Amino acid sequence: MSINQFLLTGLTTLGLASAAFADGRNPGSLLLFPEFDNRAANVTLLTVTNTNSDFTPLPNNGGFSGSVRVEFVYIGKYAPGGSTLPCLETNREHLLTPNDTLTLLTYAHNPQHEQGFVYAFAKNPQTGQAIVFNHLIGNVVTLNGLWSLDYSMNPVSFLGIGSGAGTPTDLDGDGIRDLDGTEYEAVTDEILVPRFLGQGGSFASELILVGLAGGRLFDTIVNFWIYNDNEEAFSAQYLFRCWDRVALGSINGAFNQSFLVQTNHAPNEILGANTRESGWFRVYGATAFSTAEQIIDPAVYAVLVEIIGSHGAADLPFESPVLNDPRNGALFPVGPFGDGDPIPVNGDNQ
């Protein structure tokens, strides 16, 4: 369910107003789905839609001008049964004609991986080159238990950058999708999550983390600034490789109800339910490193899945605007040097 509808189930006594989210997105050439979940009794329903309506015929029975080939790239962190994988890649391709849409179950599309993330990008149907095709939209729905809803959200959409529609995006010819403002829209500098609820008891939210710099052989350290409901700030760090979905309370005790209630918190918040603590937080990359390379201020993405009892909800977070710094996002290097030319960035997160 949408996070704006979520509290109807687990928090009906709290009387909370819906939060406002910046989840308006433009169609893009690359879509990042932060999670697929093929664990036992879980189902992930994934959709990609081609919004191009150009049915102009191409010569020599070449199809339509508005058609596109879409490559799906699954990055698996866990194998069936839960054993850890070294962020392995599985690829699938599908042709979408104008106004076409494809919906699939990820366990049927990719039975080799149990959990991880997936991205999809536009390719020229004839040449197979990655191209500018800013017409792709999508959605992902995760169900768990006996077909109860976990969450539904749109993917992170990245515009293709180039001289015009249909032009190749792989400017450096390395076969890697660069999210740096030259091939595709640059990754945000910082993730902003407008609310979390104090963890403990039936409140057991989880944070999805995606490493977008370095790739398969890189560990990423992310920094957090965690704020209670009275502007007090607490710092934290977390280390992960490639992708993770981790209990919020296990990242740092500052997320927990038992800690927040002892801070200099606002006594009348949450307004209408002042026995439950809340706060908000920032996430940004500190460093990513392999045995051969280090990347300062690496690109990362994060999504909070708020969970109360057996019910969950999520929305895309807010993103700090990318300023003048080049970004080092790349999908998805496999070697110890990452993209081969990682760009150190002087972090501007304070």
Image (spheres, rainbow, N blue to C red):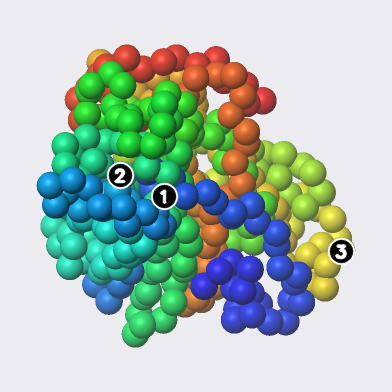
Q: Earlier in the sequence, mark 1 or mark 3?
A: 1
Residue 59 position within the rendered picture, expressed as x and y whole percent measured from the top left:
18, 45
Q: CA distance from mark 1 to mark 3?
A: 46 Å
In the image, what residue type sits under mark 2? Ala
Label 2 sits on residue: 122
Residue 13 position within the rendered picture, expressed as x and y whole percent measured from the top left:
72, 82
In the image, what residue type sits under mark 1? His
Q: Residues within 10 Å of mark 2 (few under 14, many from 20)?
A: many
The secondary element bearing badge 3 is classed as loop
Residue 216 position within the rendered picture, expressed as x and y whole percent measured from the top left:
25, 34
Q: Earlier in the sequence, mark 3 or mark 2?
A: 2
Q: Is residue 139 above or below residue 236?
A: below
Q: Are marks 1 and 2 in contact (CB under 8 Å)?
A: yes
Q: CA distance from mark 1 to mark 2?
A: 9 Å
Label 3 sits on residue: 268
| Label ID, residue 135 | 1
- Look at discs 1 and 3 and give the one toward the viewer: 1
Q: Residues within 10 Å of mark 3 (few under 14, many from 20)?
A: few
At x 61% / y 74%, what residue is drawn? 5
Residue 87 shows in the view: no
At x 74% / y 76%, what residue is drawn? 14
Q: Earlier in the sequence, mark 1 or mark 2?
A: 2
